Amino acid sequence: MPPRSDTALWSGLFRISPDSGQTLQAQIRQAIVAAILDRQIAASMPLPSCRVLAEKLGVARGTVVLAFQQLVDQGFLIARERRGHFVNPEVLAAPPEPPARPAAATGGIDWKARRRVTPGDMPEAPKHEGWIKAAYPFVYGQFDPALFPTAEWRECNRMALAVLEIRNWAADMVDRDDPLLIEQIQARLLPRRGIFANPDEIMVTLGAQNALYMLATLLMGRGTRVAMEDPGYPDARSLFRLAGAQVVPVPVDGDGIDPAAIPRDCGFVFTTPSHHCPTMVPLAAERREALLADAERHDRIVIEDDYDSQLAGETPQAALKGLDGSGRVIYLGSMSKTLAPGLRLGYVVAPAELIAELRALRRFVLRHPPANNQRTIGLFLSLGHHDALVRRLSAAFEERRQRLAEACCAFLPEWRALDVAGGTSLWLQGPPGTDAAAIARAAEARGVLVEPGGRFFDGGRHNPSRFLRLGISSIGLQHIEPGIRELAAAAERQLAAA
């Protein structure tokens, strides 16, 4: 154990950084707790005094005093008068010996043969774990830390942690949702999309994908045929197939999905009408009416994924759900594109009978999404923070989208860029001979992260290797043009080698 006078060893145990997301006091507590639980400090060894440790770490003495006091309150440390702080011997008590485990079987288990669904065989989502450190992250679906409403989010978290608020969310709500959040979704979010729903027609989910999974589990199986945009959202395609359904690809053009191309025997249609995934084109008004009329004529259910509805532009078209007079549209919404994808919060709007069944199913899966997050987001909406954030994001994204379109026109003149107002990404089609996957790999070596478009197509139709999707939500305005220059250089090298 380190002697008290060996300040070099003590400073090795207490490594703190002003760049950490934690406060200095929290970092000191974490370091002491880790040293105690790792048996690096003996119960007989006093810790450095608050004054000495504060001088060594370059922090205020009061910071160390508060850290020590909280550890005393938690039972990790004992304060002995005139002697200092010591580790509580009870914390260092040896844990019970684990029971002896039988030797591992030698035969092995063929888990692949035992499985009844094949999620591991489905196309993987792109993973850019270090995107936040990349020089030019044209990554779709991520957030920009510079635009995140940190102060407002902290305010709502503090409010949710008040004693009376904790009583509202700490209990097990079984299959219910936070009433404040339901009220805010009903009053603040849905009317902007032309949707007016009762509270029993709304359910909170762990993102829109969680809603899709439950819908597929509840409504689909072998023999179910689901019409879906091609190109389209690949994870929805995979979820439907995991449920046993047959996915029928339907082509998309400049006006969106064509209702006339949907086979009559399809019982479901999955669509992204506000901004088609991935091209961003909105579904034309005539086709919206035709899609709804066709659904009623053929007794069909429409699943509407309105994933970026709050960023749909100044004069967005009403959601299909807002035009639905027969209750055939199931509406999915999400907070991922406005607030943060890591919160995993979405909602589904459907007839009360279906919502009741979804709640029953959700109870068996996860009971309900974390209630503290629900209350925090409900407060965030009620205080107007979300409205202000949407205005700020819409302005920033529009400027970025225009800058991106201009840069692509200047540095990628042979590429076709599908530029749509209000979109949060740009869909690019390269000239003949383009290998988008190879370009993406070469661009990544230059610090540019882009997404090849092949995964959006069902069965690789329309030569998907020529397509790229460039997101704008996580890249700063000043980095767009130099990033496209680097992408153009990577594309030029690939085409020259082809």
Image (spheres, rainbow, N blue to C red):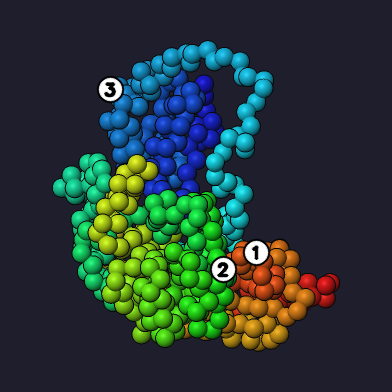
Up the image or down, 274 lies above or below 221; here it is below
Give the foreground label among 3 and 1.
Answer: 1
Disc 2 marks which residue? 249
In the rendered structure, the answer to whether residue 298 lies left or right of residue 100 reads: left
Disc 3 marks which residue? 81
**Residue 442 image offset from top left, x and y in percent:** 73, 66
Q: Secondary structure at mark 2?
A: strand
Q: Residue at x 31, y 44 (%)?
A: 363
Q: Please say if the residues under marks 1 and 2 sit with CB atoms less than 8 Å apart.
A: yes
Up the image or down, 10 lies above or below 405; here it is above
In the rendered structure, the answer to whether residue 407 lies left or right of residue 50 reads: right
How many numbered discs, if any?
Answer: 3
Q: Residue at x 48, y 23 (%)?
A: 39
The CA span between labels 3 and 1 is 74 Å
Q: Residue at x 28, y 74 (%)?
A: 325
Q: Please say if the residues under marks 3 and 1 sit with CB atoms less than 8 Å apart.
A: no
Disc 1 marks which residue? 459
Graded by Cα atoms within 10 Å as few (under 14), some (14 to 19) or many (20 or more), the crowding at tag 3 reads: few
Q: Amino acid at mark 2?
A: Pro
Q: Amino acid at mark 3?
A: Glu
**Residue 104 image offset from top left, x and y in percent:** 61, 19
Front-lying residue, 103 or 413 = 103
Front-lying residue, 46 or 419 = 419
**Residue 290 image offset from top left, x and y in percent:** 41, 81
